[in-house]
């Protein structure tokens, strides 16, 4: 089995002010030790970097270097792989979004869902219930 995570899991693990910080860090520590393939998507990685270094979003933002080191640490585990997109992901995006109203922040969710679908990843860990709108995803909240 394989799985992926949404940006919020990474953000919570780095945000000392988040009530989910301990649980998210523990979840990631366990996830990277799994024998299952742990897929990270580039939009998740760059979304993480954008949020955790932004002083208007986090009360105690990370330095860009610290945030990058967190990503490098994750990518160093043998079970972690990065998902790459191509032109087919656009067609997948169009198919999965055709019956939904996709706009604003939901665009990035739909893109991640399309990327996961394209690569056959069906399990997504997130605290964002919007992903439940994609019937092919098994959405798991690690904080419940």
Image (cartoon, rainbow, N blue to C red):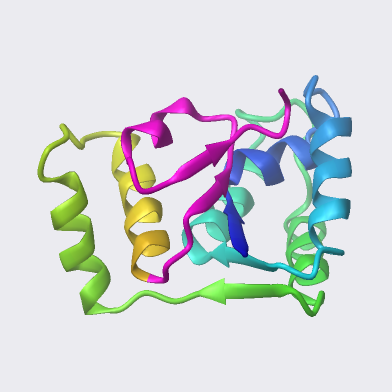
Give the residues drawn in magenta, as a range: 119-144
| Image x and y of residue 39, in percent | 60, 66
Horizontally, is 17 left or right of 113 in the view? right
Q: Is residue 135 above or below residue 85?
A: above
> Which residue is found at the position 22% from the left and 77% from the top?
87
**Residue 8 appears at what percent x and percent y?**
61, 38
Q: Quadrant of residue 79?
A: bottom right
> What residue occupies the far top of the structure in this picture?
19
- 81 vs 123, left or right, is right
The residue lying at 16 percent from left, 66 percent from top is 91
Q: Identify the residue at horizontal 52%, vertical 63% (top origin).
A: 41
Determine if the magenta segment contains residue 43: no
In depth, the one of 35 and 102 nearer the eye is 35
For this orientation, the residue located farthest to the left is: 98
> Which residue is at the front of the view, 48 or 77?
77
Q: Residue 12, located in which quarter of the rendered image?
A: top right
Q: Residue 137 lies in magenta, yes or no? A: yes
- Total labels: the figure holds 0
Task: Return the x and y of residue 122 as percentages of the image width and height.
Answer: 47, 55
* Residue with the most extreme front position: 1
Image quarter where the N terminus lies is bottom right
Q: Give the position of the C terminus as an image quadrant.
A: top right
Q: Residue drawn 73% across and 27% down?
A: 143
Going by the image, does 37 lie left or right of 4?
right
């Amino acid at each position: 089995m394989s799985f992926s995570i949404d940006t919020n899991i990474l953000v919570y693990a780095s945000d000392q002010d988040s009530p989910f910080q301990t649980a998210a860090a523990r979840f990631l520590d366990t996830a990277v030790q799994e024998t299952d393939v742990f897929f990270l998507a580039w939009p998740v990685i760059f979304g993480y970097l954008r949020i955790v270094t932004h002083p208007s979003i986090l009360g105690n933002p990370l330095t860009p270097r610290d945030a990058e080191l967190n990503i490098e640490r994750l990518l160093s585990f043998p079970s972690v792989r990065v998902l790459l997109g191509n032109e087919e992901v656009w067609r997948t995006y169009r198919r999965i979004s055709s019956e939904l109203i996709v706009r604003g922040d939901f665009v990035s969710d739909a893109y991640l869902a399309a990327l996961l679908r394209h690569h056959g990843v069906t399990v997504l860990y997130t605290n964002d219930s919007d992903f439940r709108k994609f019937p092919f995803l098994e959405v798991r909240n690690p904080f419940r």
